[in-house]
C-alpha cells in the first residue's frame, strides 16, 4: 500500500525558532518521487521541492532544508529561523512510478508562527 | 509566466442547485487535474486529463460530477445537483507532460471555495 503520514496535526512556534515537519511514507516501489507543498490561508498549494528516490542528498534552500532518509522512509522538512509568513499548512506527497502518477497526499501539518 | 487560473474564487449555492468551475492551466502543460479538498484534509484527485482525454476519473462521483477539457486547454468541472457534502475547495493543477517525465511536478491554482447550504 502507498501511504503518507504526517503525524503532527498542528505545531506552534515563536518567530525565529527552528521547526521540523515530519513526513513518513510507505511504498514498495524502489523508484518514487516525494514532494512538499505549502498552502497559505489564500488556499493555493505552492510547490516547494521535488525529490526522487535515488537522490538521498539533503537539500537546503534559504531557510528551508529537507532531510531524506530511505532507511526510515522519511522526508522531513525544517524551517530555520521561522517567520510569521511561514504560517501555513504544509503537505507532503508521494508519487509512485506506475499508473497515472497520482499524488498521494498526507493530511498536512498546520504551522503557526507567533510574533 | 502566468500560473494556473481558476474562477470563481468563491461560490455559495443551495443544495440541489448546479455549479461550474473553470480552470486555465499553465501554457503548454498537457496534463490537467481537478482535486477536491475538504477542510482539514489533503487534496483528493477527482479527474486527470492528458490533453483532452481522460486518464483517471476513478474517484469522480459520476452521478453528479462531470468535467470536460475541450481543445486540450481550459477545463470545466460541474456539479449537478450539489449536496451538502460537496462543500470544499476545488483545486485545479497542471503539469508539463505525464509521459516524458515520471513524477512531474504539479502546479496548483488558487482554488474555488464552494459552500453548499
Image (cartoon, coloured by chain):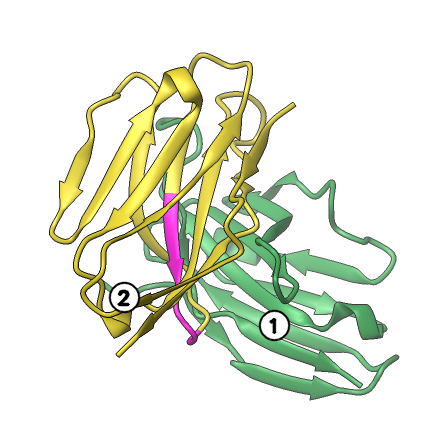
Return the residue found at the far left.
Answer: A62
Label 1's element? strand
Q: Which image quarter is the N terminus of chain B in? A: bottom left
Say if A57 sits above or below B81 in the image.
Answer: above
- According to the colouring, which chain is yellow? A
Residue at image x 38%, y 40%? A35
Residue at image x 27%, y 74%? A84
The residue beneath circle 2 is B2
The residue stretch that appears in magenta: A36-42
Say if B40 sits above or below B22 in the image.
Answer: above
Residue at image x 81%, y 87%? B14
Instruction: Tell me if residue B103 can be seen.
Output: no
Q: Where is residue B23 in the image (x, y as percent from the top left)?
A: 50, 66
Q: Dot 1 falls on which chain?
A: B
- Frontmost residue, A88 versus A55: A88
Tell whether B46 sits left or right of A66: right
Q: Dot 2 falls on which chain?
A: B
The disc, 1 or 2, on the residue closer to the chain's N-terminal end is 2
- According to the colouring, which chain is green? B
**Mark linked to residue B21:** 1
Label 2's element? loop
Instruction: Tell me if residue A50 can be seen.
Output: yes
Amino acid at each position: 500500500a502507498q501511504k503518507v503520514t504526517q503525524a503532527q496535526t498542528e505545531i506552534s512556534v515563536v518567530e525565529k525558532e527552528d521547526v521540523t515537519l515530519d513526513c513518513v511514507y510507505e511504498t514498495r516501489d524502489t523508484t518514487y518521487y516525494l514532494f512538499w507543498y505549502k498552502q497559505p490561508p489564500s488556499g493555493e498549494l505552492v510547490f516547494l521541492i521535488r525529490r526522487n528516490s535515488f537522490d538521498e542528498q539533503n537539500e537546503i534552500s534559504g531557510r528551508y532544508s529537507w532531510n531524506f532518509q530511505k532507511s526510515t522512509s522519511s522526508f522531513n522538512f525544517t524551517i530555520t529561523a521561522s517567520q510569521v509568513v511561514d504560517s501555513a499548512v504544509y503537505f507532503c506527497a508521494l508519487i509512485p512510478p506506475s499508473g497515472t502518477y497520482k499524488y498521494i497526499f498526507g493530511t498536512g501539518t498546520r504551522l503557526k508562527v507567533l510574533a | 509566466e502566468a500560473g494556473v487560473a481558476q474562477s470563481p474564487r468563491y461560490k455559495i449555492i443551495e443544495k440541489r442547485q448546479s455549479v461550474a468551475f473553470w480552470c486555465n492551466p499553465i501554457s503548454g502543460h498537457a496534463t490537467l487535474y481537478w482535486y477536491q479538498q475538504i477542510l482539514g484534509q489533503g487534496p483528493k484527485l477527482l479527474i486527470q486529463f492528458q490533453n483532452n482525454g481522460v486518464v483517471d476519473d476513478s474517484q469522480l462521483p459520476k452521478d453528479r460530477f462531470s468535467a470536460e477539457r475541450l481543445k486540450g486547454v481550459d477545463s470545466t468541472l460541474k456539479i449537478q445537483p450539489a449536496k451538502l457534502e460537496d462543500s470544499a475547495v476545488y483545486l485545479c493543477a497542471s503539469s508539463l507532460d505525464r509521459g516524458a517525465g515520471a513524477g512531474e511536478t504539479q502546479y496548483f491554482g488558487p482554488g474555488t471555495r464552494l459552500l453548499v447550504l
